[in-house]
Image: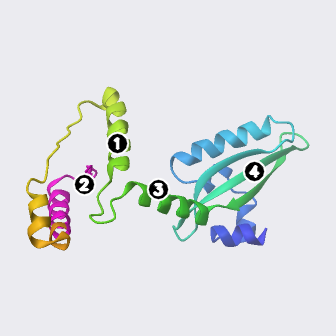
Amino acid sequence: NEEMARLLGRDRESLRAVAVSTLAVDDDADRLAQATGDAQRAGGHPVAVEHRYATARGREGWSRTAIRSFPGLGCQGWTVLTMQDLTRDQEALEEQRREAEQDALTGLLNRRGGDRRLTAALQRMVLSGPVAVIICDADGLKQVNDRCGHGAGDDALVDLARRLRTAVRAGDDVARMG
C-alpha cells in the first residue's frame, strides 16, 4: 500500500515482487526470512517478527511485521506483510537505556552499564579469548571537593573521563563505577 511504500521510500509497484528478506537490515534479514518460511507453513495464520529495515535512502528504522501467506494455484501464492513502524518506540527505549546506563556528568557508562558490558565481555571470552579489565581510583577527589568545591571536583572527573576515553581503543568501554 501507499503507506508502506512511503515508509520504505520506494514506489508501490516495486514492492509487489520484492523478496521479503530484502526489507530487513543485516542479521535481521535471516530472522525475517525465517518468519516468512514459518508463515508459509502456518496455514494462513500470521507470524510476527520485529526487525530493522532500511529505506531506499539508507535510513534505518524498526518494524513489527506480521506475515501471512495464502497458497495459490500451482507453486505461486501470495504473501501479505503488515508493517507497523516501531522506530520512535525503539528510539525512546534506546534513550531510556542510555540514560539508565550512562553517567550524566561524564558521559561514561555508569555502574549498571559497566556491569552489563563486563558481564557480556566475560561471556564472550569463552569464544573470543581473554578480556582485559583495568580499575583505577581517582585519589584525592574528596580533597579537591573540600578545598575547591564540588564544581572543581566535577571538572576533574570530566577531564579524567575525557582522558580515559582517548586512551582506549574504539569499541573499548570506560565506566564510572563510583
Compare marks 3 and 1 and give the one earlier in the sequence: 3
Residue density around tag 3, few if under 14, some if 14–19, many if 20 or more, within 10 Å:
few
Front-most of residues 97 and 85: 97
Residue 78, horizontal then vertical, whole percent: 83, 49
Kindly indicate whether the residue at mark 2 contacts the one at mark 4 (C-beta within 8 angstroms). no
Q: In this view, does 128 lie above or below 56?
A: above
Q: How far apart are the two marked residues, 4 and 3, measured between alpha carbons?
A: 27 Å
Residue density around tag 4, few if under 14, some if 14–19, many if 20 or more, within 10 Å:
some
Kindly indicate whether the residue at mark 1 contacts the one at mark 2 (C-beta within 8 angstroms). no
Residue 110, horizontal then vertical, whole percent: 33, 53
Query: Which residue is painted at 20% across and 52% down in the image?
Result: 169
Left/right placement of residue 24 relative to residue 173 reads right
User: What's drawn in magenta, residue-wise?
Assistant: 154-178
Q: How far apart are the two marked residues, 3 and 1, measured between alpha carbons?
A: 14 Å
Q: Which amino acid does label 1 sit on?
A: Asp
Q: Which amino acid does label 2 sit on?
A: Ala
Front-most of residues 41 and 50: 50
Residue 101: image quadrant is bottom left
Left/right placement of residue 95 relative to residue 19 reads left
Compare marks 4 and 3 and give the one earlier in the sequence: 4
Instruction: List the residue tagged with mark 4.
Output: 66
**SS at circle 2:** loop
Kindly indicate whether the residue at mark 3 contacts the one at mark 4 (C-beta within 8 angstroms). no
Compare marks 2 and 1 and give the one earlier in the sequence: 1
Q: How far apart are the two marked residues, 2 and 1, measured between alpha carbons?
A: 19 Å
Residue 4, horizontal then vertical, whole percent: 72, 66
Residue 97: assigned label: 3
Q: Which amino acid does label 4 sit on?
A: Ala
Instruction: List the residue tagged with mark 2.
Output: 170
Left/right placement of residue 112 relative to residue 83 reads left
Residue density around tag 2, few if under 14, some if 14–19, many if 20 or more, within 10 Å:
few
Q: Which residue lies furthest to the front in this view?
A: 146
